[in-house]
Amino acid sequence: MSATFVIELYVFVLAGFVGYQVITRVPPLLHTPLMSATNAISGISLVGSLVAAGSRQGTVSTVLGVIAVASATINVVGGFLITDRMLKMFHRADATPAKGPSAK
Amino acid sequence: MRDLFIQAAYLAASVLFILGLKSLTKPDSARRGMQQAAVGMLLAVVGTLVNHEIVDYRWIAVGLGVGALIGYPLGMFVPMTAMPQRIAISHMFGALAATLVGIAEYHTHRLDLPRARVAALGFEVLFGSLTITGSFMAFAKLQELIRGKPITFPGQNVFNLLLFGGAVTCFGFLVANPAQPAVFYGMIAIALAIGILMVLPIGGADMPVVVSLLNSYAGLAASATGFALGNTVLIICGALDGASGFLLSVLMSKAMNRSFRNVLFGAFGGDTAVKGIKSAEGLVAREISVEDAALRLAYASRVIVVPGYGMAVAQSQHQVRELAELIERRGGEVKYAIHPVAGRMPGHMNVLLAEANVPYDRLYDMDEINPQFEQADVALVIGANDVVNPAARNDPSSPIYGMPILNVDQARSVIVLKRSMNTGFAGIENELFYDERTSMLFGDAKSSLTKLVTEVKSI
């Protein structure tokens, strides 16, 4: 087992742990934006796709790479846009002047 | 120097992503946090583009252009009601990217790959492939391109297990003998088939679990890509994604009183669903007129609205909000009780109501709102059924016994808006509808609500 692999495993486990801790505190209210956000973030596959598409390792690599770049970009662009669109809609009662007396 | 810049960009991106997810713990900070995460993504991409391995930018530009052209409408114009299928299809794109990168890697280096790398690539394409077809199937079911009902055949579980065994065997064989392209591609084919077969027997109401689970798989595929390419930012993001998806699927399963195994192998919620043990014979439901319902709502001081999937289907969120505003203007208090699986994906109902301009501080989770039903004058149930069925609490013979429900039956009075007396998704009779405190207002949710709004206005 190489040293790099061990370090990578550390990174994976710790990142998973951080993710778990952070995400348990996301209220159910925002679970849909959470999903679209992790989706946008998983567009990070773009990083690997770009190398495959642009490193001239033969036609197969380039073709698959370009399709991968397009797919990952769809997630990045679409994911961040839709997350923002959703989050924009969440507002408190006192932020809308047209409301009646605030409850509670 | 260049490497240093790249690594710094990746590190900054990882930090911004984690901060972005952390910002989602509070609705007020969420938007800015996610915008920062988007900046993180830009940094990571710029960092990658200066990588010296990249020598040709023409095709990259094509890929980025096409992706942006498809991604923009998917981000800007998809209606909120279509969110579950929108998310499902984007899991497919994410998994597709990971899988194709994996195949390209394998194809280029197939003759001189160390075992650890093949193992990482194997994981990547396995999780990736089954997520591609699984997500597409979920998308097709949610979009109603294919029947949403479970599709089963005899020996299904055994067949799926055999396929899974085949994929694992291929994987083990590859790690032992990396230079076997036929086995590699065979494994991908099997994984693609598993993805289809895995989602076929799952019904519409179970989609929240499946979509969350596929989210997790897409994340694991991205993480495996990171291991294969030795890229830490990919490992980190994949792990975040995986953790999030896993957590959500556990939450959703719990909310439906189902184990993972049960969701994946049970094929619940279709024609084969268990019939209700208690029949409705001899029980009479009380019907209420629009006028009486409007009167009761208008003079109530505490109203709890329980929106269900039926409300979303009828697209009546705006009418609900209008009615709530009228009640509030008359001095009543309106709260919304949101069951975790009220929509077709985690948190879906909250988004639909937020879109209809309902303030988020009026939306309450099940645990927060349940103790408050006792004080509510009226609980207004709109198109919800199984999530308000008291049998889940007090009838051990009921198939939904043990499922966490909203305690609507504890309210002083209940008005149920429903199309007819048909049973809900699980095909179980709901004794709430026959309770003496319950009145039924039959009809399409949207037209009933519109009439209620007019009536309350005229009082």
Image: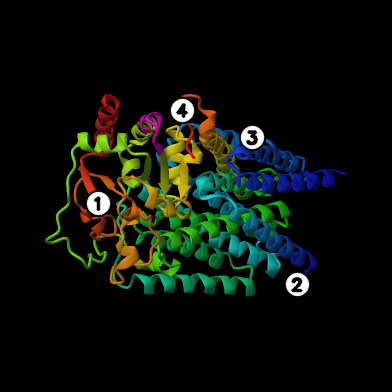
Q: Is B328 included in the stretch rendered in magenta?
A: yes
The tag on residue B437 is 1
Q: Where is residue B407, by image quadrant? A: bottom left
Question: Residue tagged by mark 2?
Answer: A1
Q: Is residue B228 visible?
A: no
- Going 44% across and 57% down the picture, which residue do you hit? B210
Dot 4 alpha-carbon crowd within 10 angstroms: few under 14, some 14 to 19, many 20 or more: some
Callout 4: chain: A
Structural distance between the alpha carbons of marks 3 and 2: 38 Å
Mark 3 vs mark 4: same chain? no
The tag on residue A99 is 4
Q: Amino acid at mark 4?
A: Lys
Query: Is the Cβ of the residue at disc 1 closer than 8 Å to that at disc 4?
Result: no
Query: Is the Cβ of the residue at disc 1 closer than 8 Å to that at disc 3?
Result: no
Secondary structure under tag 1 reads: loop
Between label 1 and label 3, give the one nearer the viewer: 1
- Going 25% across and 61% down the picture, which residue do you hit? B428
Q: Amino acid at mark 1?
A: Arg
Between label 1 and label 2, give the one nearer the viewer: 1
Q: Amino acid at mark 3?
A: Ala
Question: Residue tagged by mark 3?
Answer: B61
Query: Is the Cβ of the residue at disc 3 closer than 8 Å to that at disc 2?
Result: no
Mark 1 vs mark 2: same chain? no
Q: Which residues are magenta?
A: B326-333
Q: Amino acid at mark 2?
A: Met
Q: Where is residue B194, by image quadrant? A: bottom left
Question: How many numbered discs?
Answer: 4
Callout 1: chain: B
